[in-house]
Amino acid sequence: GTGMESHALHGDGIYYESGDKLWVNLYVPSTAQWAAAGVKLQMDTNFPEGESATLKLTLESPRQFVLALRRPGWAGDGFSVKVNGKPVSEDVINPLREVPESGRLIADRSLRKSGSYVELKRIWKTGDTVDLILPKTLRLEPLPDNPRRVAFMWGLLVLAGDLGPEERGRREGRSGYSREKTPVFIAAERPVEEWLKPTGDKPGHFRTDGVGRQRDVDLVPFYRLHRRTYAVYWDLFTEPEWKVKEAEYAAEQERLRKLEEATVAYAQPGEMQPERNFNFQNPGDSWVVRTMGRPGRWGRSWFSFDLPVESDRPMALVVTYCSDHHSRGRAIFDILVDGQKIANQEVTRSSPARFYDVEYAIEADLIKGKEKVTMRFQATDRNVVAAIFGIRMIRAHAER
């Protein structure tokens, strides 16, 4: 599923307690009662766009315990903690570790990458307050398989690029390729702070500075964009790399544009709503996969989708596979339109991993007089259906 229900569970992870230690994991406006210790906590913050949080304590009686405050990996160098207005010492915020051989003690900044906890042990009493500053800094989050394809993070927030108004009148099931070309950035190997600059309009509003091809773009926290075309992943190049890649990149962008223009419907296997929209069917032996961040589905016997067609013109099916996805068995299967076989496909593994499309012609008599057809992927003998990452019904003779 989409996991939307997970957002109702964030409250379960704000505070943890064990023995004489209380962990503060999330900086969320909240109240909590630590019954075992007779402590009430109240958290106030100005997140997500601000950078401060305040924790107020009320106790039945003074009590010694450890308050462990999470220092997120994204918090910058200005991270600070105050108790009753007094700064917590640097050696508590940045634990020291011994350098092998030299015996010197240095701040262990390696802890910050994955996050750590600042532990405050003292006798706490009613009225005590803890104030935190958690600065958000810019950073790049690359894909695991491609360090030059990145998302922009501002602290804990994903930034999305505003590519213009959402297109109207799009038919359900289109894949969402934007006619507004997504720019690339000629900024690889440069610090992101040099070329992604705050606009000053509102916290979290940034704009690229002279690095966009074909244009620069505004970026804002993802949740702010409504009814806008957007992108969250971007390709980075150096100037010499872009000179080599520019023609190839432009050709691929044009191919995608023409493919989208020819598309009647696009179904995304592995995502709940698209599978509902296109009447996904399976006897119970098909599973969702995710490869290089993209959802898909494979099966042991068969699965099917219902796709709309335009019966007055030739149609074709375009299916997206991955060269390096490991199905649990040999992937050989038939593709059927309303029970009539149109192709037999074998998907074999090869490196490097890449997504690729295969097009299958659909004869006119298979769609004559119909508004939709059932596309069935059916394993042969003891084989399996390969993982499929996209199913597209297109006009066969459209300009591509």
Image (spheres, rainbow, N blue to C red):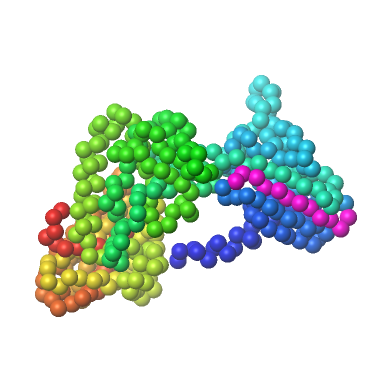
Is residue 231 in view from this perspective? Answer: no
Q: At which x and y percent is residue 299?
A: 34, 67
Q: Is residue 158 above or below residue 302?
A: above
Residue 385 position in % (x across, y down): 29, 65
Give the residue displayed 21% in from the left and 57% down from the top.
Answer: 261
Residue 2 image position (x, y, % from top left):
45, 64
Using the rendered view, name the quadrant where residue 248 is placed.
Answer: top left
Q: Residue at x 73, y 60 (%)?
A: 32
Residue 172 in magenta stretch = no
* Residue 8 in the figure: left or right of residue 63: left
Q: Position of residue 73 (x, y in %)?
A: 58, 42
Direction from residue 339 to residue 157 in the image, left or right: right
- Residue drawn at point x = 81 percent, y = 60 percent: 36
* 345 left or right of 228 in image: left
Q: Main secondary structure of the magenta part?
A: strand
Q: Residue at x 78, y 58 (%)?
A: 40
